[in-house]
């Protein structure tokens, strides 16, 4: 699974389109994301194995201003050993991330970014597991800073963001529903 995710990610990085009409610039491509994640609830802490999510991204830039949209979908296996002592099976987690982003570049390398994030998890457990299917939906605003640096004349750039999210979380385990806050910092580093 890990090798397959890496191969798909490399292939996706080679796909991208940019259309430009000064000073308006539209970039459309596919964003891959290999990651692990961890979340806590009253029932325990869930930690995934490495998984891949990917999907379309579009960014419209006008001068120093930009707006973008991203839709990512993928699966993360969660070892039941993080939930049930002695189990070697994995639960399947489907994750969907949607971001609507706006920002302003202060100079060619640094900028401010903000927007609205929506995350949807569905954790399905194998038959015979004592755990019940769980869903978590988080949504809300985020804001922070970004940095990017071009890699010569290749058309690629490295980038990084540091944001703080103020999301609201709604969870459902079996028939029991709960709600709470899902706030905190997030760091992303990548190649575009």
Image (cartoon, rainbow, N blue to C red):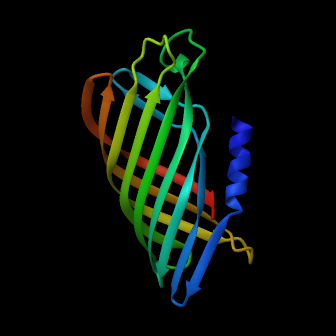
Quarter of the image where one finds residue 90: top right
Residue 154 location, x and y as percent?
A: 74, 74
> In the image, is 27 to the left or to the right of 123?
right
Count of all numbered marks drawn on residues in the image: 0
Residue 107 location, x and y as percent?
A: 51, 79
Q: Residue furthest bottom?
A: 22
Eyeballing the image, is 2 above or below 32?
Answer: above
Eyeballing the image, is 165 above or below 83?
Answer: below
Q: Residue at x 43, y 33 (%)?
A: 122
Quarter of the image where one finds residue 178: top left
Q: Residue at x 51, y 59 (%)?
A: 161
Residue 162 location, x and y as percent?
A: 47, 57
Q: Quadrant of the C terminus?
A: bottom right
Q: Quadrant of the N terminus?
A: top right
> In the image, is 150 to the left or to the right of 126?
right
> In the image, is 142 to the left or to the right of 150?
left
Q: Residue at x 48, y 75 (%)?
A: 60
Q: Residue at x 33, y 48 (%)?
A: 139
Residue 71 location, x and y as percent?
A: 48, 55
């Amino acid at each position: 699974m890990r090798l397959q995710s890496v191969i798909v990610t490399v292939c996706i990085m080679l796909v991208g389109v940019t259309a430009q009409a000064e000073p308006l610039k539209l970039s459309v491509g596919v964003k891959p994301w290999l990651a692990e994640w961890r979340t806590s609830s009253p029932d325990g802490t869930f930690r995934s194995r490495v998984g891949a999510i990917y999907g379309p991204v579009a960014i419209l830039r006008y001068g120093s201003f930009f707006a973008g949209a991203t839709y990512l979908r993928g699966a993360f296996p969660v070892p039941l050993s993080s939930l049930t002592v002695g189990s070697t099976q994995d639960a399947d987690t489907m994750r969907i991330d949607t971001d609507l982003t706006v920002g302003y570049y202060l100079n060619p390398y640094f900028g401010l970014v903000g927007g609205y994030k929506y995350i949807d998890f569905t954790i399905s457990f194998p038959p015979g597991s004592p755990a019940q299917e769980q869903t978590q939906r988080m949504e809300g605003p985020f804001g922070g800073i970004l940095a990017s640096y071009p890699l010569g004349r290749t058309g690629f750039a490295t980038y990084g963001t540091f944001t703080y999210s103020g999301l609201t979380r709604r969870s459902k385990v079996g028939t029991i529903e709960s709600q709470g806050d899902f706030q905190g910092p997030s760091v992303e580093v990548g190649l575009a």
